[in-house]
Amino acid sequence: MALFTAENAAEMAKRAAEAKLAAKEQTKLAALSPETEADFAEKHRKLRLLRVRKQQERIDTMLLAESDPAKLDRLASAAIRLNEQERQLSNRSLPPTLKAGTVKAKRNSSAPPEPGE
């Protein structure tokens, strides 16, 4: 069992003073630069975007060097997932989708209507 001595008391008092000083400094910093939730979310988004782009570069390098079909398939799947994350983090919308067979023929306005229309 530890004994309570003058040395222990002095050490604990020193630690308590350091903790109080650190808490005061933290409070001052928080008062000087209040970080809102939106600021924090934006900072997180930017950091995540940087990490995703680094991972994309690594995956691209690995894709070029790989020859095993199973590993190529897994790397391609990872690349697709990273590309989707990067698109979302960059605030880009999906490209428009074109439906097959919906091409409309232009009609001449002076031509008579075809039967059955």
Image: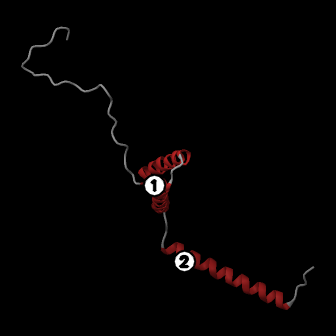
**Residue depicted at x 48% and y 56%:** 65
Residue 97 in the image: above or below residue 59: above
Percent coordinates x, y for residue 32 in the rendering: 49, 75
**Disc sitting over residue 28 in the figure:** 2
Helix, strand or loop under label 1:
helix
Q: Would residue 42 be seen by someone viewing this image from the given angle?
A: no
Q: Quadrant of residue 60?
A: bottom left
Looking at the image, the residue that sits furthest to the right is 1
- Residue closest to the eye, 31 or 51: 51
Q: Quadrant of residue 57?
A: bottom left
- Residue closest to the eye, 44 or 82: 82
Residue flagged by tag 2: what amino acid is it?
Lys
Percent coordinates x, y for residue 13 in the rendering: 75, 86
Q: Would residue 18 be seen by someone viewing this image from the given angle?
A: yes
**Residue depicted at x 37% and y 43%:** 94
Disc 1 residue crowd, few under 14, some 14–19, many 20+, Cα 10 Å: few
Looking at the image, the residue that sits furthest to the left is 110
Residue flagged by tag 1: what amino acid is it?
Leu
Measured Cα–Cα span from mark 2 to mark 1: 51 Å
**Residue depicted at x 19% and y 24%:** 105
**Disc sitting over residue 64 in the figure:** 1
Q: Is residue 70 left or right of residue 104?
A: right
Q: Quadrant of the N terminus?
A: bottom right
